[in-house]
């Protein structure tokens, strides 16, 4: 029992998750609906939600999964690439949110532990590395950057007010180096994509508008890394950093990122199907660089594709071998 992601309309806005499940699946009892949510099988806005009374809003997406999502990985899976008194650079794994939703900030620690975010996982790692005692407040993180939950890769947090301000200025000035690897179906050439993004393009999803006085400018620089038999591996450098910018830009060109579940639909509702389903969103923040906001030192890191994406990429490459074997 499951259903594909559904887009919440105005008619369903305000319903609790449990009520929405019962409306979608009338055969469910209230107890069954609550158990589905609490057993890691319901996603709200592409993130697991454990709260049966969480209310949905127009434009939200809700998905009932066929199987429960696996328990979160151990904390040791989070790698600190750089740590000093002013900032920390982290290797984010897929399936972990960068920050917690505002409505979840007052949750008790036990409930937060069911779906920990980097905000929850990184401070104890910092305390351990700095040799702090267990008692007392954990190091505070100041949010200057976010990655989507399914996106893996490098992310930076500020740890001091001067760092927060300095990094904020660099992000605002578009001087931070942010390069992503993305795999898309079909063949796409190098280009500079410039649009204006709005929160609702007409179907309750974020997207581009043709009106020059609306939305915010979004610029993505795309280069080809590798052409494959049915796909293209791309390097995408962000000049601006709007929400879901790369995912939207590539999807609007007719090449949604492999594993895309939100922006794989056209305005008319037609789903753009990839013949080779990916295990998750094939988007990885591979490079991060900026000037240290306090010392002025140039800093730059890179992170290779994680194993799950490498395995999928190899399987896509093998299509070429199979096609060659058939020709022979």
Image (cartoon, rainbow, N blue to C red):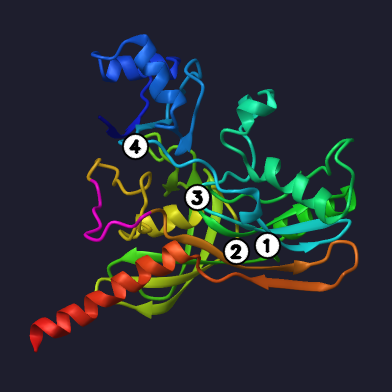
Q: Are marks 1 and 2 in contact (CB under 8 Å)?
A: yes
Residue position marked by numbered label 2 in the rendering: 239
User: Looking at the image, is mark 1 or mark 2 earlier in the sequence?
Assistant: 1
The picture places residue 91, in percent across and down from the top left corner, at: 63, 60
Give the mark, 4 or 3, whose residue is nearer the N terminus.
4
Quarter of the rendering containing residue 123: top right
Kindly identify which residue carries mark 3.
244
Task: Tell me where the magenta segment starts and ends, as one range.
Answer: 271-279
Percent coordinates x, y for residue 253 in the rendering: 34, 60
What number is the disc on residue 275?
none
Camera-nearest label, 2 or 4: 4
For the residues labelled 1 and 3, the Cα–Cα distance comes to 16 Å
The first of marks 1 and 3 along the sequence is: 1
**In this rendering, position of residue 251 left or right of residue 176:** left
Report, in whole angstroms, how far the alpha carbon at label 1 lies from the one at label 2: 6 Å
Residue in the image at 64% along x and 29% along y = 102
* Dominant SS type (magenta): loop
In three-dimensional space, the C-alpha distance between marks 2 and 3, rounded to whole angstroms, equals: 13 Å
Q: What residue does disc 1 label?
A: 174
Mark 2, Cα crowd under 10 Å, few <14 / some 14-19 / many 20+, is many
Dot 4 lies on which element? loop
Residue 17, given in percent of the width and then of the height, sits at 43, 20
SS of the residue under disc 1? loop
Q: Quadrant of residue 177?
A: bottom right
Between circles 1 and 4, the one closer to the viewer is: 4
User: Marks 4 and 3: which is nearer the front?
Assistant: 4
Q: Secondary structure at mark 2?
A: loop
Q: Which residue is mark 4?
A: 67
Classify mark 1: residues with Cα within 10 Å, few (<14), some (14-19) or many (20+).
Answer: some
């Amino acid at each position: 029992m499951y259903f594909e992601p559904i887009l919440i309309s105005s008619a369903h806005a305000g319903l609790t998750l449990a009520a929405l499940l019962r409306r979608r699946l009338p055969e469910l009892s209230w107890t069954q609906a609550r158990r589905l949510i609490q057993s890691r099988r319901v996603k709200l806005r592409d993130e697991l939600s454990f709260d049966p009374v969480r209310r949905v809003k127009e434009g939200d997406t809700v998905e009932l999964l066929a199987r429960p999502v696996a328990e979160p990985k151990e904390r040791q899976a989070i790698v600190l690439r750089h740590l000093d008194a002013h900032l920390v650079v982290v290797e984010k794994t897929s399936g972990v949110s960068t920050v917690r939703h505002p409505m979840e900030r007052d949750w008790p620690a036990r409930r937060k532990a069911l779906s920990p975010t980097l905000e929850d996982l990184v401070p104890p790692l910092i305390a351990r590395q700095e040799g702090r005692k267990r008692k007392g407040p954990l190091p505070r993180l100041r949010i200057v950057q976010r990655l989507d939950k399914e996106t893996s890769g490098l992310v930076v947090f500020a740890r001091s007010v001067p760092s927060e301000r300095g990094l904020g200025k660099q992000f605002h000035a578009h001087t931070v180096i942010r390069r992503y690897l993305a795999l898309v179906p079909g063949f796409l050439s190098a280009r500079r994509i410039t649009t204006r993004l709005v929160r609702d393009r007409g179907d309750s999803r974020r997207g581009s508008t043709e009106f020059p006085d609306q939305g915010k400018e979004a610029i993505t620089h795309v280069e080809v890394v590798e052409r494959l038999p049915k796909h293209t591996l791309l390097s995408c450098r962000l000049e601006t950093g709007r929400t879901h910018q790369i995912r939207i830009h590539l999807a609007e060109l007719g090449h949604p990122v492999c594993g895309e579940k939100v922006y794989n639909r056209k305005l008319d509702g037609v789903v753009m199907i990839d013949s080779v389903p990916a295990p998750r969103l094939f988007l990885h923040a591979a490079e991060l660089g900026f000037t240290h906001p306090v010392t002025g030192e140039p800093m730059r890191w890179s992170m290779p594709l994680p194993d799950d994406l490498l395995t999928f990429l190899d399987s896509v490459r093998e299509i070429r071998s199979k096609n060659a074997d058939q020709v022979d």
